[in-house]
Amino acid sequence: KNQVEQSPQSLIILEGKNCTLQCNYTVSPFSNLRWYKQDTGRGPVSLTIMTFSENTKSNGRYTATLDADTKQSSLHITASQLSDSASYICVVSNGSNAGNMLTFGGGTRLMVKP
Amino acid sequence: GAGVSQSPSNKVTEKGKDVELRCDPISGHTALYWYRQSLGQGLEFLIYFQGNSAPDKSGLPSDRFSAERTGGSVSTLTIQRTQQEDSAVYLCASSLVSGQGSFGYGYTFGSGTRLTVV
């Protein structure tokens, strides 16, 4: 069964600190892995899309890693800001990008406190 | 219900026809989201409901798209005069998130409705 597990489920950090969110998946075959940021009450916004051959991809203060052998991904946030408070969703596709081919993680709720 | 239920799972319609997509969220979930995923694209947010009201409709692509939610439960997404570019998978999700500043539980997504406009 295709599954995407994210950890931790929720996280509270102080402004300025770094944090790392984890995503483990069992989706097969693998096409790509996406990290989304979703502010409360808003739609998710794509942060990165990683394919099989990509190990690291950065987007500003966000850096995603992918280990296709162990089927693990991480999202590292450096120098956190209050605006980073949101849900971060890991989504894995097995090829067609159709709704029933996407496996979603349950998300990590991040709260950045001043 | 045990999960978010969407119907139909697949819909083929002729260009110019109206379609209605249904989402039945998890019982007790106050927040409901509609997303769209076109081929090769990421999730595209359409609209968000908190109870029966829609605080955020910013993602609706045109006035042919509308959605409503009744009784804080079932939601329908209506597309009028469908166009070929409307072909996509429409995903619904629900959560316990109750509003700005609160942290609810995980978002539960339905399996989607695959809409094909021919």
Image: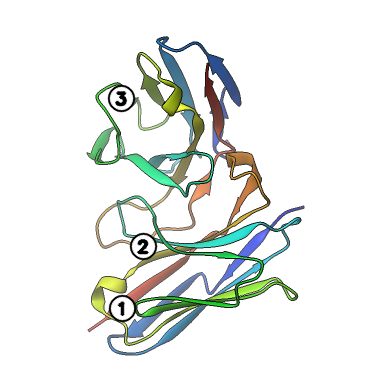
Does residue B100 sit above or below B74 in this rendering?
A: below
Left or right: B110 in relation to B95: right
Image x and y of residue A72, in percent: 65, 74
Give me the residue at 47% from left, 49% from top: B42
Q: Hey, which quadrant is residue A19 in on the image? A: bottom left
Q: Residue at x 49, y 57 (%)?
A: B106
A24 versus B54 height, above or below: below
Q: Chain of mark 3?
A: B
Q: Amino acid at mark 2?
A: Phe
**Callout 3: 10 Å neighbours few (<14), some, many (20+)?**
some
User: Residue at coordinates 33% horizontally, 26% vertically from top-left?
Assistant: B67
Residue A37 in picture, x, y percent from top left: 39, 62
Q: CA distance from mark 1 to mark 3?
A: 35 Å
* Residue labelled with disc 2: B103
Q: Say which chain tag 2 marks.
A: B
The residue pinned by badge 3 equals B66
**Tag shown at residue A112:** 1
Disc 3 secondary structure class? strand
- Mark 2 neighbour class, 10 Å CA radius: few under 14, some 14 to 19, many 20 or more: some
Residue B15 placement, left or right of B11: left
